[in-house]
Amino acid sequence: MSFEVPIERGKIREFARAAYSQNPAYDSPGAVIPPTFLTTAANFWGDGTHPASQLGFELARVLHGGEEYEFFGRPPHAGQTLTASPRLGERWEKEGKRGGVMRFAKIVTEYRDAAGSLVAEQRTTVIETAKPPKQEG
């Protein structure tokens, strides 16, 4: 389920503009990525399969519970191609305040450069609510 992530200057610039950043480091020939840029990697270059589907979570009840990033050295920059390898991490359950059990899971994605060195790790927390959202109407 690994996929390639070409780090393109134009995509860096688009992301920085969407975040209202004026930082010139995001719009130069060797532009570095903003810290949260990797969030978009699966949307642009992944196969469209949400990792939560491997958990048996009902996607209509899945919430985004948080995002963490760890970088190992210089941030990735324009011109690099990274290999992203997502995997399921820790899983746990908790009683919901409105009744029912909520399920949690971490999805860990490692990003490696052409030499195979780990350059970044993204940890996403997903939550499956105990009950589906109420329908308006």
Image: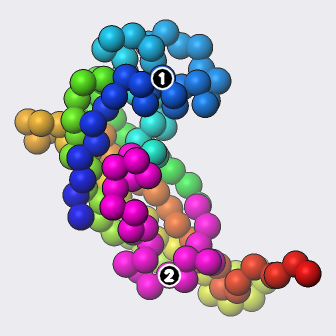
Q: Report the residue at 61% width, 30% height from top.
A: 19
Query: Which quadrant does the N terminus fall into?
Result: bottom left
**Where is 90 relative to 34, above or below?**
below
Q: Give the image quarter of residue 88.
A: bottom left
Mark 2 neighbour class, 10 Å CA radius: few under 14, some 14 to 19, many 20 or more: some
Q: How many labels does the image show?
A: 2
The residue closer to the viewer here, 101 or 79, is: 79
Observer-side mark, 2 or 1, equals 1
Q: Is residue 67 above or below residue 25?
A: below
Q: In 3D space, how far apart are the residues under numbered discs 2 and 1 (Cα atoms)?
A: 34 Å
| Residue shown at 34% from the left, 28% from the top | 8
Left/right of residue 22 with respect to residue 2 in the rendered view: right
The magenta stretch spans residue 49: yes
> Which residue bears the numbered disc 1?
13
* Quadrant including the C terminus: bottom right
Residue 55 x, y percent position in the rendering: 41, 80
Per the image, the residue denoted by label 2 is: 57
Residue 44 can be seen, yes or no: yes
Q: Earlier in the sequence, mark 2 or mark 1?
A: 1
Q: Which amino acid lies under the numbered mark 1 shown in the image of this protein?
A: Arg
Residue 70 pos. (x, y %):
37, 40
Residue 18 vertical placement versus 32 (above, below): below
Write the start and end of the magenta stretch as one range. 41-64
Which quarter of the figure has residue 101? bottom right
Q: Does the magenta stretch include residue 79?
A: no
